[in-house]
Image (spheres, rainbow, N blue to C red):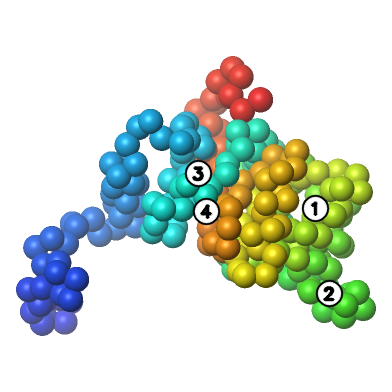
């Protein structure tokens, strides 16, 4: 029976029966069960381990597709630098409000982390019009002197990632971590390939796939690691990610 008292169909179009429904029902149970399923379906040896597997697993969970694993490029130095930045109460700059909204306060607030969407910067539309470019690229240009030691999350706009890479090429102090996962058909794959070929700590996914939710998932995974380490006073294992 469903919540309205009506009988559930014995089978759906995909061939599943009501008897096959997973009993997990709370958000915590569903997440834990999802992670357990992913662990079972990606047996060891896995392409990532430790903290990087926690990031990869949350990415898989976000898109519901284990196939994305082969395209993920997760840098160990990015893992360490990202967690360290979060523990120091950094600012996470995002290219969209959607990415910012994907990082809940329950994870960020205990770490003293601020999440700022580039789109919320004042005067951005006028600046973009004057530059003849997108708001994302104009916003990234406005932040060039503020990125050192912070985390930059780009899940939508290849132009924002290209602007960041241009700034870094000119000697702009780099962020602690770049999560570069813009999605789409125009310069998304190219911008991510350029990021992956560079020396800066980063997480990315090759090809056209990506998105704000996927990029936010990476920071959520890092925040969970940071919160656990803060709670237990844990140090990084010697040599990890350095």
Q: Residues within 10 Å of mark 2 (few under 14, many from 20)?
A: few
- Per the image, label 1 sits on a secondary structure element best described as helix
Say if mark 4 contacts mark 2, CB within 8 Å. no
Q: Name the residue under label 2.
A: 133
In front: label 4 or label 1: 1
Confirm or deny contact between disc 1 and disc 2 (CB under 8 A): no
User: Mark 3 and 1 residues: CB-CB less than 8 Å, in contact?
Assistant: no
Above or below, 157 relative to 27: below
> Which structural element holds mark 4?
helix
Q: How far apart are marks 3 and 2 (CA)?
A: 33 Å
Give the mark nearer the N terminus: 3 vs 4: 3
* 207, 51: nearer the viewer: 207
Distance from the alpha carbon under mark 4 to that under mark 2: 28 Å
Secondary structure, mark 3, is helix
**Residue 226: x percent and y percent?**
56, 38
Residue placed under numbered mark 4 in the picture: 217
Q: How far apart are marks 3 and 4 (CA)?
A: 8 Å
Q: Quick one: label 4 or label 2, which is nearer the N terminus?
A: 2
Give the CA separation, mark 3 to mark 1. 23 Å
Percent x, y of residue 166: 85, 55
Q: Are marks 3 and 4 in contact (CB under 8 Å)?
A: yes
**Number of labelled discs?**
4
Label 4 vs label 1: CA separation? 22 Å
Residue at 64% of width from left, 59% of height from top?
A: 189
Instruction: For residue 61, say whether it is visible.
Output: no
Q: Which mark is residue 165?
A: 1
In the rendered image, which residue does mark 3 sit on? Answer: 55
Q: Sort mark 4 into few (<14), some (14-19) or many (20+) by Cα contacts within 10 Å.
A: many
* First-in-chain label (4 vs 1): 1
Left or right of 149? Residue 215 is left
């Amino acid at each position: 029976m469903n919540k309205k008292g009506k009988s559930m169909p014995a089978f759906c179009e995909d061939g599943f029966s009501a008897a096959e429904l997973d009993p997990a029902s709370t958000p915590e149970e569903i997440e834990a069960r999802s992670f357990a399923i992913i662990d079972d379906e990606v047996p060891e040896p896995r392409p990532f381990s430790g903290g990087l597997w926690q990031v990869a697993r949350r990415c898989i969970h976000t898109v519901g597709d284990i196939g994305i694993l082969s395209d993920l490029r997760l840098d160990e130095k990015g893992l360490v630098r990202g967690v360290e930045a979060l523990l120091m109460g950094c600012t996470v700059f995002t290219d969209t409000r959607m990415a910012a909204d994907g990082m809940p306060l329950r994870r960020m607030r205990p770490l003293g982390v601020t999440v700022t969407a580039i789109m919320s910067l004042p005067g951005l539309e006028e600046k973009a019009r004057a530059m003849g470019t997108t708001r994302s690229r104009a916003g990234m240009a406005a932040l060039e002197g503020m990125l050192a030691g912070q985390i930059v999350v780009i899940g939508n706009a290849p132009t924002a990632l290209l602007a960041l890479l241009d700034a870094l090429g000119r000697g702009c102090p780099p962020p602690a971590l770049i999560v570069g996962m813009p999605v789409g058909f125009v310069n998304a794959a190219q911008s991510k390939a350029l990021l992956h070929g560079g020396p800066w700590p980063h997480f990315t996914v090759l090809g056209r796939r990506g998105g704000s939710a996927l990029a936010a998932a990476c920071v959520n995974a890092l925040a969970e690691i940071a919160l656990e380490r803060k709670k237990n006073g844990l140090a990084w294992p010697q040599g990890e990610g350095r």
